[in-house]
Image (cartoon, rainbow, N blue to C red):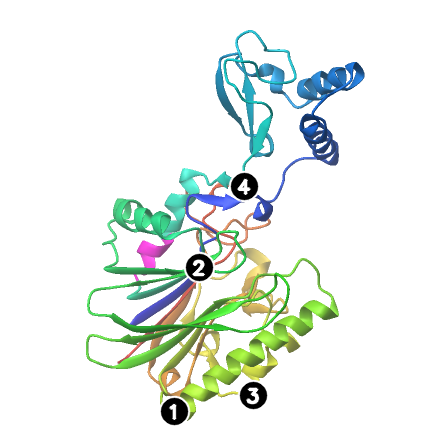
Amino acid sequence: MKIATFNIQNLFHRDKSLVEQPIGKCITDWIEELDMLMRKTGNSLPEQERIRELSFLLGFEKTTPLPYAVLRRKAGLLYMKGIHHSTESRAGHLTNWNGWIELQTKPISPTATDNKARVISNINADILLLQEVEDRASLEEFNQIVLTKFNCKPYSHTFVIQSNDMKGLEIAILLREGYILQTIKTHLIGGYCDLFQQLVEYEISTPNSEEIHILATNLVKQTDDTEMSHTIRKSQVENIAKIYKDLITQGKTKVIIAGTFNTPSYCDSLSPLFQDTDVKDITKHFSFEVTTDEGDDATYYRLGAYKMGVNIKQKDYILFSSALFERMQDSGLNRKAMWPTKKPQWSTYKTVTSKYNAASGHPLVWGLVDL
């Protein structure tokens, strides 16, 4: 049985709050000012003149003056312009609409989507765990259409569990023929306000009737590194450890914990798992192999990295119970679709030429277990 986990960072579209904004502060201020002026029911002559100035600075004057919506790449805004009102501050009677609409998501480059499929097809896991999937419809289109472009047979079963942050960061599982999802259980694992996180528990029967339990989660990275963020994460991990111990106590010894923790293993917030349970990290298995960095980095060990010569900070994990870790045959990590912060650092696919067409900022981690 080959199992893999991959934080795919969405398939076709991503919440714009999660996308790095390649714009300066001036442009951000202009957008906020223009948005504020457009919301007003009436504008004075100086304000109307300022709207025209801001429209020019933001490039709206370059749009074709036709009576339909034009989707601008700048900040993902939908701006209406009419034939006879190309320089006016609002739409006319042709559109019967006034103002602009701020879109919540931004499209992902088709090349980046292809690179996501390329990584998955190269590993071809029997059980694939994905984090940050926008919705089931997108996942099914990706499974049936995009994966087949790389000679990867679509997965027989796909399931998406919606998260509670409303940003398209759902958790998904894909199964090959013969692997049957028996039960799904969700656990709320702590936090407060908008920081609640959930853990999804899957009970899966394999083709040879073995039963395994998978605990999958995506602990979203906090915006700061304060003591409060540390406390929240540690509380979440304590709950994960408790659920794991309960399964072991019930005699369910074949357990896997997988997903994105967004912090390296030495972090104290992960100690409830690494110090208070018997789980073992896949990266510590003798079979764990990765193509190392190039040049001097090949002999360098970065604090928090996966291993020597694999100098990306560990954020994604597959943890095995002792019963499964002993039956591990092979394991590894695929980062060929990640864009290095400096070049050359490690080998990538030829289609990965920048961070904008990279598959994700996370590698795909996988393990092969003899069942």
Would you say the residues marked 3 and 1 are in contact, meaning their CB atoms lie under 8 Å apart? no
- In the image, residue 189 lies in the stretch drawn in magenta: no
Would you say the residues marked 4 and 3 are in contact, meaning their CB atoms lie under 8 Å apart? no
Residue marked by disc 4: 104
Q: For marks 4 and 3, give the CA distance.
A: 41 Å
Three-letter amino acid code at the position of disc 2: Gln
**Residue nearer the viewer, 220 or 333:** 220
User: Where does residue 64 sit, x and y in percent of width and height?
Assistant: 52, 13
Q: For marks 3 and 1, give the CA distance.
A: 18 Å
| Residue at 32 percent of width and 79 percent of height | 212
Q: For marks 3 and 2, give the CA distance.
A: 30 Å
In this rendering, is residue 179 above or below 147?
below
Image: magenta residue range:
119-124
Three-letter amino acid code at the position of disc 1: Gln
Residue marked by disc 2: 162
Residue marked by disc 3: 276
**Residue nearer the viewer, 319 or 217:** 217
Residue marked by disc 1: 250
